[in-house]
Image (cartoon, rainbow, N blue to C red):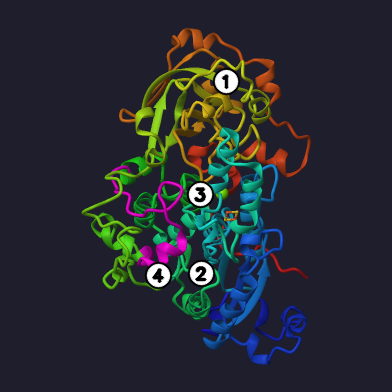
Amino acid sequence: MASDLRSSEWYSGDARNAYIHRAWMRRGAPASAFEGRPQIAIANTASDLTPCNAHLTEVAQSVKNGIYEAGGIPLELPVVSLGETQVRPTAMLWRNMAAMATEEMLRANPIDGVVLLGGCDKTIPSLLMAAASVDLPAVVVPGGPMLTGTFRGEALGCGTDVWRLSEEVRAGTLSEDQFLRSESSMIRSRGHCNTMGTASTMALVAEALGTVIPGLAGTPAPDSRLLEAAHETGRLAVELVAADRRPSTLLTAASFHNAIVALAAIGGSTNAVVHLLAIAGRLGIELTIDDFDRIGADVPLLVNLQPAGHYLMDDLQRAGGFLAVLREVRDLLDPTALTITGRPLVDYLDEARIWDPDVIASRANPLLPAAGITVLRGSLAPGGAIIKPAAASAHLLKHRGRAMVFDSIEDFRARIDDPELDVDEDSVLILRGCGPKGYPGMPEVSNMPLPKKLLEKGVRDMVRICDGRMSGTAYGTVILHVTPESAAGGPLQVVQTGDWIVLDVRNRRLDIDVPDAELAARVPNDATVNGYANPRRGWERLYIDHVLQADQGADLDFLRGASGSKVSRESH
Ligand code: FES
Ligand code: MG
């Protein structure tokens, strides 16, 4: 095995360069560390500024124990980490940077395989993108959700209840003081958001893809079983190297099929669409937004978690966990898709059970018969847009209303609560300039708060349209990821306040009722164009010049595909 290892290109032999590579790494390590033992990186997104991942260093220790036990050498590699709530202008702007930096450091270093430790929203996607492009044996340990916090006897869902409670304050049904007092109750423990937001979704989707030991995703961060599974994953990483099981040999169209089925059944975040498209793009797998509609649209909703439902992630675990959900939709899964253990995903479903049917519904009695993401096209979104009907209001899924257009989130905030604003509950709120290029980074602003005067009248949902994304913890009749975005010259750039907008979700249409010729003759306002980001230098400049639209996962054009793990030259 020794000479087969990638790391032996650094460490083996008597030449001067091998001496250099070994000597600086020795520092107490036994000579055997460099004699044919797999070098396993632990790509660790722990950071004090990514609070959802701060505990991953403890998880890394369990991974290390497992790697040692199986004969490998563990090497912790801190990688770029993104705290969803901290990073400005939006964590999504840095996802591709995190993926690129991780890919390059995995390639540049003498390692044979990698364990990926992620949690908060963008961290698992960036790690998987990196692993796909460097194509070294890789396995994910999701850091797990936090425990449920309670306030005045009621459970608080991370994210979702912030939106809900802040709307209540604006509607005058909750005092400012009570709202602020809920703040310290929301984050009860270590771990990521406990709703079915993007972090929970991506952990489960990573397991559906086959990149996590089956049954692990969804284990709460403080649960001892997480450490046990982390230890087991460390052992597995050493086996992966021997088996040469790499992203390019593991992940297939069948894996993505299963991820899309899972995404619908759990009522997962719309952000998973962008992330899965980006990961598939690294692997050269032809995945399109239409696949989400085709494969996922008729999958039943089985998981009763916020934001679409009631419960939180530790309830899901107690109720039987993710495998119990997958067991219900087993016939919709592709049985050929393998997991990181070498066995098919469907092999793991026999023993799964639903212990609480309030949390995990059975196939016979689903929460909704069809839960997937619907792709809309039409004169307002020629390249497509998405909506999650399960999080929308049934009465708005077919709707005709007049546009109220905002050129930026700042414009929106300045005007939305103006009592004179010409809107009623039938109006369609449109926010542009929030796409990958325009903002930049496609922020989670699509779930615009409703006008205060309508909230006070009891209105709780309106049709909203945006070229940005929406937090996975949000809900409402929100059409997002409109492509092409406004800043890329899409029709969104010339829609005007007062235009009639026609939404027909069943027929998958989103149109402006303005004659084509008139639309084509319109030119964007200065206010619109001036709202687009135009940085002079740095990552933002690189990003704007190279970012692809949402329907291609908002990856950078030059990062699609893989380069493998070969390095061109020796360092000395
Ligand atoms: Fe980190 Fe929600 S902010 S997962
Ligand atoms: Mg989020």
Q: Is residue 140 visible?
A: no
Badge 1 is on which residue? 405
CA gap, disc 4 and disc 1: 46 Å
Task: Give the mark nearer the N terminus: 4 vs 1.
Answer: 4
Looking at the rendered structure, the kind of residue marked 2 is Pro
- Please report contact status of discs 4 and 1: CB closer than 8 Å, yes or no: no
Residue at image point 40% right, 68% down? 318
Q: Is residue 414 magenta?
A: no
Which mark is nearer the camera, 3 or 1?
Answer: 1
Looking at the rendered structure, which numbered label has been put on residue 275?
A: 3
Do the residues under discs 2 and 4 have CB atoms within 8 angstroms?
A: no
Q: Are the residues at dot 2 and dot 1 in contact (C-beta closer than 8 Å)?
A: no
Distance of label 2 from label 1 (alpha carbons): 48 Å
Could you tell me residue 404's position as x and y percent? 55, 19
Label 1 SS? strand
For residue 171, the mark is: none
**Mark 3 or mark 4, whichever is nearer to me:** 4
In which quadrant will I find the C terminus? bottom right
**Which residue matches tag 4?**
215
Stretch in magenta: 297-322
Mark 2 element type: loop
Mark 2–mark 4 Cα distance, whole angstroms, equals 20 Å
* First along the sequence among labels 3 and 1: 3
User: Mark 2 highlights which residue?
Assistant: 137
Q: Residue at x 50, y 81 (%)?
A: 235
